[in-house]
Image: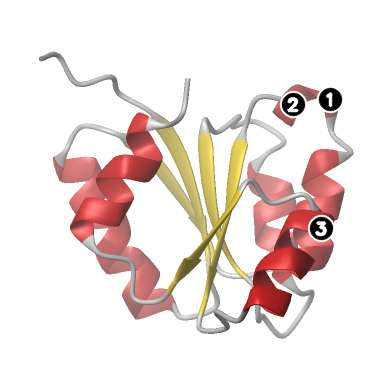
Amino acid sequence: MTQIIKQILLVDDQADAIDALAMLLEMDGHTVRTAYSGADALATIENFVPDLALIDVSMPDMSGMQLARLLRSNAALAKTRLIALTGYASEADRQAATEAGFDGHVAKPVSGDQLARLIAQTD
């Protein structure tokens, strides 16, 4: 089976964790951009349209929920799959993520199998 290469945006204020994840994804051939804040993510999407964006919900400059709403208002990102990457995994947290515009909700740390499924679900 041929792997489809994806453009992936990783947004998290925990640089070490997100950089390690980016390296793994790049080793699989994906094109990855990292952003360490909501503002960084907004600047990144000016010239990079991801197929998939994994976004931390709790960041200091703007929440992942706020960022998801802003990304959803951008027509160029209509097909981008947004996934909340968070330590908050209650049903209320999942509902809030859905209401903010996320397509999915994954508790940290994300496993390799979960990541592979998320990538496979993007078209």
Quarter of the view holding residue 28 = top left
| Residue placed under numbered mark 3 in the picture | 100
Quarter of the view holding residue 62 = bottom right
Residue at mark 1 to residue at mark 3: CA–CA distance? 16 Å
Contact, mark 1 vs mark 3 (Cβ under 8 Å): no
Contact, mark 1 vs mark 2 (Cβ under 8 Å): yes
Q: Label 2 amino acid?
A: Ala
| Residue placed under numbered mark 1 in the picture | 75
Q: What residue is drawn where x is 20% and y is 32%? A: 29
Q: Label 3 amino acid?
A: Ala
Q: Is residue 13 above or below residue 42?
A: below
Q: Residue furthest left?
A: 1
How many marks can you see? 3
Q: Earlier in the sequence, mark 2 or mark 3?
A: 2
Q: Label 1 amino acid?
A: Ala
Identify the colour scheme used: secondary structure
| Residue placed under numbered mark 2 in the picture | 78
